[in-house]
Image (cartoon, rainbow, N blue to C red):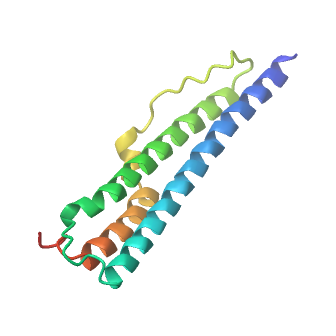
Amino acid sequence: MSNDEKVLEHLKMIQGVIERMGRNSFQLKAWSAALATGWLAFVAQGGTGQLRPGFLVLVPFIILFALDGYYLWQERLFRGLYDAVRGAESTDYSMATSDSGGFWSALFSRTVLFYHMAPVILVAVATPGVMYA
């Protein structure tokens, strides 16, 4: 196998990881939307009754928000690795990434922050006891 073929195979491996990270991020966004829709339907039916969820109702949204930021961070790391391998003449099939940007910049990026804040705001406003607990 030539060095060019090895580099190409390594790039395919890295691209597979990047695609999985993107799918995971998409799933988390879908779960967040489904959870918000379900909770808003529950509140609209008067389902909270004597239940005072307070801020506990926001915990799943915060977890999904953090996981989405983590997957975006990992995706960025593997994109950096992809760029490094693309410019290399040979490869050792290493999947080690170098930290660039950091977790916090991914967590508070527009794609993650704005998407996950909309359901949190809707749920917080619609649920008794969250805003004025």
Residue at point 79% right, 29% down?
8
29 sits to left or right of 127: right
Depicted 122 relative to depicted 85: above or below: below
Residue at point 50% right, 38% down?
74
Coordinates of residue 70 in the picture (x, y in percent): 44, 43
**Most distant residue in the front direction:** 50
Depth check, front residue: 129 or 71? 129
Coordinates of residue 67 in the picture (x, y in percent): 42, 47
Depth check, front residue: 74 or 91? 74
Residue at point 56% right, 49% down?
24
Quadrant assignment, res 114: bottom left
Quadrant assignment, res 100: top left
Quadrant assignment, res 129: bottom left
Residue at point 28% right, 63% down?
57
**Most distant residue in the bottom direction:** 45
Depicted 18 relative to depicted 112: above or below: above
38 sits to left or right of 78: left
